[in-house]
Image (cartoon, coloured by chain):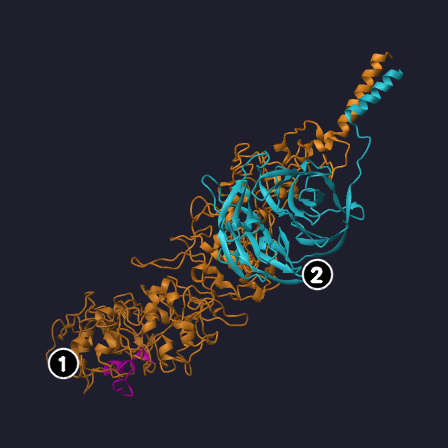
């Protein structure tokens, strides 16, 4: 009988009946404030050098600008296809010099503004032969060669223009291989000018050098800690930590730039849940999270 | 128990335990593409590690399936713009309700699944595996994620089949192209059908991203959506029929308040209405078209609304058109639909959506009293064109003295309107709340017969036609013709003013107050008070040159035509008491005045002749002409008077229908009596030259003899012989003509006694 009992215990273990639960790797944060109002499914965020916060209120076809304290300053844009008009824009980036780039998704173009929201210029993101109409969902400026990286979501490519709107090069294709994408989304850049690109349905963030050469990827498929199910937003802090939001799981996880899982954003050691978190920004130890279904922007103070 | 059995038992327990703890994982696929949606199939849940989202195999929305396939969060995680942007469609504003049980009026077919709770959920309509899905793995493909393609709202109609069969459910028509759908409708988000202008569910509704409640493409709180297509009907806004103005607390059958459902909702509901026209108010029995109006304006309702009164224009009646007549007002079939050969209903005259047909911006107001220029009439009626559209035979009234806008512009009808406001017809008739039966618009004087009272409303001293009175002596009215054995084609009326074949004579027997000249419809009338004559004067037929109107009843008297007593023949220049020649007065008018006769007796139109004390007054009528200095001065009997004291008791010869009729007249009144003296008309019928022939005269002045000479009776069986025997004629001649006494003419029978 003892032998039988031993065999049964071994069988239990082999079959993986849960006998233990992994601990939550928390990165604690402190809630500072959130910004609500007549916002309709916002997507992306950028923090200007002066601390003002710009976020894309896309279904309302406008950009909202608030101060570092969260108080409304102004907004610009309205529905349309003229200069300064938008059709459901999704992405935003602001250079250190104060140039605001907007991925005007529905108009298949990039529009450029100054910090006051004054229109400067715009250019169309072109589609190649056999491609679908361009679907620019995010834009990321780089000081390397004045590049402007554009996620062409529907064509599964990153298209690179210079910041004046001159096409430079592109990479990517539909697929699961490194360097390929299944719906590339938001982007971020680190101090080394490496670009991090959310690869939505491949449930990963890929890191490339400034010229599109694959370096590594972060995250894997799943719903456990360190895994991604619907990665959407990405931000890199000055410690080269990579923050990735997952809109389905409602969490923000933190990785090293080489992909090692550091933890998940918590509050008082409890998992911090967000309503479809998408765009992220990190600045001055603050984490800015755009909650698309929550119709708000949440600002947290990071403990790291 | 053997070891083997014990082992089998443990393995069985283990298996059950495993299955129960992983209930949701049975049949799971780890294929990555599937898990994009079927998250509960993830291998991550098979570990002992804590997941960042809970394992919820119980969150099953569809019967007999697993996982959160159709959880909204899963859908949104791709349709947020980073795979497909449906934010502005599916998660913006209003959308089709989910997680609610279908109402009783909805029948969900089996191929459109409900949740385990019997609720509608995303997967009821959507499935990534439905018809129209792109080939698996095609990166450039686009999947129509419907269970069935929604061509022309066909998917909507699978559940909303009752609304789709709009004719039986009294719902808004679909698949109809009766109206050109405006561009604005599509700018607001309406879906265009494959056939242009075809109304489909999605013409008004947007399943996702609808601007307004009830998933309407735009707000309809002020009926803005209705007005997009029904542009004309938007004129109702701010009128009395905008019940927000007049009955703000009113609700329709769906208990919808006006400020929520819009002004159209007061009367109409787009789906499952109670009756045709999408009727949203209680339905009355009977006449289907006008009941819509009478529900509020009928006498039985409790609403403080305009009522139509006891005397109102008939509805639900057919109109008889003249051969060349066309009308432009709508008529309605039994079911209330427009029909060229239908009946008159309220809507025939009223466009209940437009207060002022000429100035649509004029919405009137709650306390504004309507008149002929507005009042929701289809056509401005200040010139009565609306009335005349059907009543074309009354058109002449507008160019007659009976157009009071010309002849009595200050006259007000019972509603207080002057002719300029009420229109020519409205002076005497109002379609609703009339004072009497012919839709009478005047206060009726309180005496006299009914029909004459209508006329007396104006033709009365101190009334608007006070100068056009009939005087003390006028043609009898309110009399039956039957006892006089008169048959006429002229209209006769009963005491209520209704035309009947055995009715009585009233003013309107001879007069048609709407037609000035019966023979000349295109009269050149300069709109001044015109003095009429026997050819016009609203007579039903001309009374000149022949007195046809008089003769319509007085057929026996019609034989006067062409005789010596026809003044056209014997004295065309003579004038009656009104100084009218026969041309002006007509044949009959030379001797009889229908109105304003100074003489009551026979309405005599000429000066009475001299009457001596011993003569009957009836003889004075004859003496008017047959006396010295007058027009028949050559036809004066030397001795015309029967001895005064020889009264005749006439009981045998007083039947008008018999050949021996010989009337006796009261000496003083001139009325027929049984006891009196013989006078001229005892033997003479002034209207008939000869009793032997029923013929008119020869239009020339001729000398008579004993067979004619207007004698009533040329036989020996006459009144004379009653006293005088068979030599009466001799005696008569003897007394009338002294010369006859010298040479008595044969045959004379001498009575020797």
Residues shaded magenta? B600-624
**Observer able to see residue B495:** no
Check residue B685 for magenta coloring: no
Q: Which disc is residue A69 wearing? A: 2
Q: Say which of B652 and B554 sits in front.
A: B554
**Color of chain B here?**
orange
Q: Nearer the viewer, mark 2 or mark 1?
A: 2
Q: Which disc is residue B741 wearing? A: 1
**Share a chain, discs 2 and 1?**
no
Q: Residues within 10 Å of mark 1 (few under 14, many from 20)?
A: some
Left or right relative to B44: residue B556: left
Could you tell me which secondary element the residue under label 2 belongs to?
loop
- In x, y percent, where is residue A12? 81, 24
| Quadrant location of the N terminus of chain B in the rendered image | top right
C-alpha span from label 2 to label 1 = 148 Å
Q: Say which of B260 and A193 sits in front.
A: A193
């Amino acid at each position: 009988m003892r032998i039988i009992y031993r065999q049964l215990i071994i069988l239990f273990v082999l079959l993986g009946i849960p006998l233990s639960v992994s601990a939550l790797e928390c990165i604690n944060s402190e809630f500072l404030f959130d910004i609500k109002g007549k916002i309709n499914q916002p997507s992306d965020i950028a923090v200007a050098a002066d601390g003002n916060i710009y976020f894309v209120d896309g279904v309302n076809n406008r950009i909202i600008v608030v101060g570092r304290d969260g108080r409304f300053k102004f907004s610009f844009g309205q529905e349309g296809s003229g200069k300064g008009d938008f059709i459901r824009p999704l992405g935003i980036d602001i250079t250190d010099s104060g140039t605001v780039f907007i991925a005007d998704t529905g108009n298949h173009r990039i529009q450029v503004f100054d910090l006051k929201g004054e229109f400067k210029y715009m250019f169309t993101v072109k589609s190649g032969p056999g491609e679908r109409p361009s679907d620019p969902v995010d834009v990321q400026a780089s000081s390397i060669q004045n590049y402007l990286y554009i996620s062409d979501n529907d064509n599964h490519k990153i298209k690179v223009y210079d910041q004046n709107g001159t096409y430079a090069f592109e990479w990517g294709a539909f697929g699961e291989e490194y360097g390929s994408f299944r719906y590339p989304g938001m982007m971020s850049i680190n101090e080394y000018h490496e670009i991090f690109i959310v690869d939505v349905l491949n449930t990963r963030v890929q890191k490339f050098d400034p010229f599109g050469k694959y370096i590594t990827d972060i995250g894997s498929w799943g719903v456990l800690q360190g895994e991604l199910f619907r990665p959407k937003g990405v931000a890199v802090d000055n410690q080269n930590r990579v923050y990735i939001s997952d809109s389905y799981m409602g969490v923000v996880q933190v990785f090293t730039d080489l992909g090692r899982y550091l933890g998940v954003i918590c509050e008082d050691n409890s998992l911090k849940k967000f309503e479809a978190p998408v765009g992220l920004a990190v600045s001055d130890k603050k984490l800015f999270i755009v909650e698309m279904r929550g119709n708000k922007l949440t600002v947290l103070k990071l403990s790291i | 128990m053997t070891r083997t059995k014990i082992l089998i038992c443990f393995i069985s327990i283990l298996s059950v335990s495993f299955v129960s703890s992983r209930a949701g994982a049975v049949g799971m696929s780890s294929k990555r593409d599937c898990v994009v949606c079927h998250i509960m199939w993830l291998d991550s849940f098979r570990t002992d590690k804590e997941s960042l989202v809970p394992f919820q195999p119980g969150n099953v929305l569809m019967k007999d399936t697993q996982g959160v396939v159709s959880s909204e969060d899963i859908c949104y995680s791709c349709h947020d713009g980073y795979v497909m942007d449906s934010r502005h469609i599916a998660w913006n504003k209003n959308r089709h309700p989910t997680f609610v049980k279908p109402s009783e009026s909805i029948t969900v077919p089996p191929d459109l699944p409900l949740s385990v709770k019997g609720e509608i959920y995303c997967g009821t309509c959507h499935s990534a595996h439905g018809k129209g899905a792109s080939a698996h793995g095609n990166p450039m493909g686009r999947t129509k994620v419907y269970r069935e393609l929604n061509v022309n709202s066909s998917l909507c109609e699978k559940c909303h089949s009752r609304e789709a069969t709009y004719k039986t459910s009294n719902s808004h028509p679909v698949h109809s192209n009766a109206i050109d759908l405006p561009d604005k409708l599509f700018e607001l988000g309406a879906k265009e059908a494959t056939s242009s202008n075809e109304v489909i569910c999605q013409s008004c509704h947007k399943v996702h991203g609808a601007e307004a409640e009830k998933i309407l493409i735009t707000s309809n709180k002020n009926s803005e959506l209705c007005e997009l297509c029904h542009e004309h009907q938007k004129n109702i806004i701010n009128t009395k029929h905008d019940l927000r103005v007049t009955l703000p607390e009113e609700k329709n059958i769906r208990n919808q308040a006006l400020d929520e459902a819009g002004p159209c909702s007061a009367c109409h509901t787009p789906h499952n209405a109670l009756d045709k026209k999408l009727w949203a108010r209680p339905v009355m029995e009977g006449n289907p078209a006008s009941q819509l109006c009478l529900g509020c304006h009928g006498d039985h309702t409790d609403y403080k609304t305009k009522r139509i009164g006891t005397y109102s224009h008939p509805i639900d009646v057919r109109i008889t058109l003249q051969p060349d007549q066309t009308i432009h007002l709508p008529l309605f079939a039994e079911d209330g639909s427009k029909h060229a050969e239908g009946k008159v209903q309220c809507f025939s005259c009223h466009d209940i959506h437009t207060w002022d047909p000429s100035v649509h911006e004029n919405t009137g107001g709650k306390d504004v009293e309507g008149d002929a220029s507005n009042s929701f009439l289809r056509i401005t009626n200040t010139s009565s064109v609306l009335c005349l559209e059907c009543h074309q035979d009354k058109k002449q009234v507008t160019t007659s003295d009976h157009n009071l806008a010309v002849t009595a512009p200050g006259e007000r009808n019972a509603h207080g309107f002057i002719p300029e406001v009420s229109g020519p017809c409205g002076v005497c008739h109002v379609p609703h709340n009339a004072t009497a039966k012919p839709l009478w618009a005047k206060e009726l004087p309180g005496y006299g017969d009914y029909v004459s009272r209508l006329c007396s409303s104006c033709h009365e001293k101190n009334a608007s036609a006070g100068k056009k009175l009939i005087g003390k002596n006028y043609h009898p009215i309110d009399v039956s013709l039957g006892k006089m054995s008169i048959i006429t084609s002229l209209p006769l009326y009963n005491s209520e003013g209704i035309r009947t074949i055995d009715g009585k004579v009233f003013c309107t027997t001879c007069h048609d107050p709407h037609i000035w000249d019966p023979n000349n419809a295109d009269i050149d009338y300069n709109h001044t008070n015109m003095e009429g004559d026997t050819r016009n004067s609203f007579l039903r037929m001309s009374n000149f040159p022949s007195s046809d109107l008089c003769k319509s009843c007085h057929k026996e008297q019609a034989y006067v035509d062409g005789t010596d007593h026809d003044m056209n023949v014997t004295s065309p220049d003579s004038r009656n008491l009104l100084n009218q020649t026969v041309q002006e007065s007509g044949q009959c008018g030379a001797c009889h005045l229908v109105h304003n006769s100074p003489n009551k007796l026979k309405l005599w139109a000429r000066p009475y002749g001299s009457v001596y004390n011993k003569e009957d007054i009836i003889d004075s009528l004859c003496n008017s002409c047959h006396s010295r200095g007058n027009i028949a001065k050559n036809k004066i009997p030397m001795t015309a008077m029967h001895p005064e004291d020889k009264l005749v008791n006439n009981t045998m010869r007083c039947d008008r229908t018999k050949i021996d009729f010989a009337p006796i007249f009261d000496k003083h009144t001139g009325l027929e009596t049984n006891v009196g003296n013989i006078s001229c008309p005892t033997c003479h019928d002034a209207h008939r030259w000869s009793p032997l022939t029923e013929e008119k005269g020869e239009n020339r002045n001729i000398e008579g003899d004993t067979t004619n000479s207007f004698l009533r009776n040329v036989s020996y069986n006459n009144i004379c012989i009653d006293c005088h025997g068979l030599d009466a004629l001799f005696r008569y001649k003897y007394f009338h003509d002294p010369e006859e006494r010298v040479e008595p003419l044969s045959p004379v029978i001498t009575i020797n006694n």
